[in-house]
Amino acid sequence: MSDIAPIREEAFRRAGNVCEWANCSSSKWLELAHLKDIGMGGNKARKYNVDNTAVLCKWHHDIYDGRQSMGTKVAYRELLEGYLDRHSGVT
């Protein structure tokens, strides 16, 4: 078992096994994404911190990491709106 496995399990449990991108509830092709880049050297403080992770579907992980540009403006607007709704107390 790798050192990241417990972090992965905790993140997936937190996410309820669905994509954590706002307005997405996909349960297919889920991946563990690092929010702050861990860098080529593998910053262990960030790599092994569950608060630096998000469970994202393949589509949203590719957008977040810049591997996909199609639809990114709309996707980032959804992410921002979802974040603001969750943290402003608006229901």
Image (tube, grey):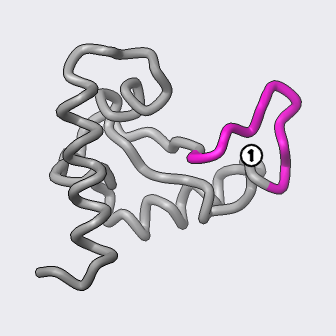
Which is nearer the eye, 19 or 65?
65
From the top left corner, tell me how far across and down residue 17 is, in percent. Answer: 32, 57
**Magenta residues, dominant SS class:** loop
From the top left corner, tell me how far across and down residue 38 is, in percent. Answer: 74, 39
Total number of numbered discs in the rendering: 1
Q: Residue at x 83, y 36 (%)?
A: 42
From the top left corner, tell me how far across and down residue 47 is, in percent. Answer: 74, 48
Q: From the viewer's perspective, is residue 46 above or below residue 56?
A: below
Q: Residue at x 34, y 30 (%)?
A: 58
Instruction: Please state the extent of the stretch shown in magenta in the rendering.
Output: 35-45
Q: From the viewer's perspective, is residue 39 above or below residue 88?
A: above
Residue reaching furthest to the left: 91
From the viewer's perspective, is 21 left or right of 10? left
Q: From the viewer's perspective, is residue 1 above or below residue 42?
A: below
Image quarter of residue 83? bottom left
* Quadrant where the image shows the C terminus: bottom left
Q: Is residue 32 visible?
A: yes
Which is nearer the eye, 52 or 17?
52
From the viewer's perspective, is 65 left or right of 1? left
Image quarter of residue 15? bottom left
Q: Which residue is mark 1?
A: 2
Under tag 1, what secondary structure? loop
Image quarter of residue 39? top right
Q: Let me know if residue 19 is in the magenta part.
A: no
At label 1, the amino acid type is Ser
Packing grade of label 1 (10 A; few <14, some 14-19, many >=20) is few
